[in-house]
Amino acid sequence: MTPKPWSYSALEDFKNCPRAFYEKKVAKSVVETKGEATLWGEHVHKQFEDFLRDGVALPADLQMHEPFLLRLLNAPGTLGVEEKIALNIRGEPCGFFDDDVWYRGVIDAKKVHGSHALLIDHKTGKHHTKFGQLKLFALHTFTAHPEVETVRCEYYWTQTLTKNGQGYDRSQVPALWREFLPDLRQYAQAFKTDTWQPRQSGLCRGWCPVTDCEFWSPKRKRA
């Protein structure tokens, strides 16, 4: 079986439980419903996109983010908003739906100014320091923009109006790719052998939609 194009979230989903990934993304035997948190995240991203791209005013409940977005708009460089990015198996930029697409992602905001790029990912969930998604954005930017030598990647946390992130330079590209290779090899092997082992976790307690898995159990009722 040919591996499906992957994204950071898809690879994380596979790592969490290959069986659940298979049922959701390959066999498509189950459908995940969008919860309130997901719907809210989509709403925020759309409002930020409209503000940055078209100058549409933010709704009242999001106006506290206007100073951050204005600083981004006024920063030097060429702005990209909700940019769909893709690489083929050779690590070359390609179209999002090309036949040879291998990796896909979406950069919420990007500013390229000379040899430097600033990449922003808007986050509406809980604060964390997992920067794998940002590293993939940096890898694509180095490939798509040969003039770029340094990249600053940041999460913008809408709950706290704070940022965190990391900077990378072009010399780090091989090392950054090596961080993903072990997981990508397991991902490809699962498709090759059509083997999708379940992996037990807290998600098995009523959160996973694969209800016929041997590890699944219903959510505990609150007293």
Image (spheres, rainbow, N blue to C red):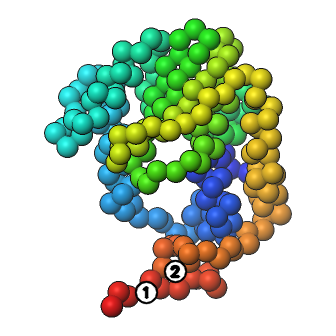
| Residue 63 image-quadrant placement | top left
| Number of other residues with Cα within 10 Å of mark 2, as a class: few under 14, some 14 to 19, many 20 or more | some
For residue 192, the mark is none
Residue 109 position in % (x across, y down): 45, 28
* Visible residue check, residue 80: yes
Question: Along the horizontal axis of the image, is 109 left or right of 91?
Answer: left
Query: What amino acid type should be assigned to the residue bearing mark 2?
Result: Arg
The N terminus appears in which quarter of the rendering? bottom right
Residue 29 percent location from the top left of the image = 56, 69
Name the residue nearer the viewer: 53 or 154: 154
Residue pushed farthest bottom?
223
Vertical order, 185 against 113 (above or below):
below
Determine the residue located farthest toward the left in the rendered image. Answer: 60
The residue lying at 78 percent from left, 68 percent from top is: 195
Amino acid type at image mark 1: Arg
Residue 173, above or below 102: above
The answer to which of 67 and 178 lies nearer the viewer is: 67
Q: Residue at x 83, y 63 (%)?
A: 193
Q: How far, Cα to Cα, is label 2 from label 1?
A: 8 Å
Q: Position of residue 133 (x, y in %)?
A: 59, 42
Label 1: how many Cα within 10 Å (few below 14, some 14–19, many 20+): few
Mark 2 touches mark 1? (CB < 8 Å): yes
Q: Quadrant of the C terminus?
A: bottom left
Q: Residue at x 55, y 36 (%)?
A: 165
Question: Which residue is under mark 1?
Answer: 220
- x and y, in percent, of residue 27 in the image: 62, 65
Residue at the spot of label 2: 205
Q: Residue at x 74, y 36 (%)?
A: 176
Query: Vertical placement of 158 versus 119: above or below?
Result: below
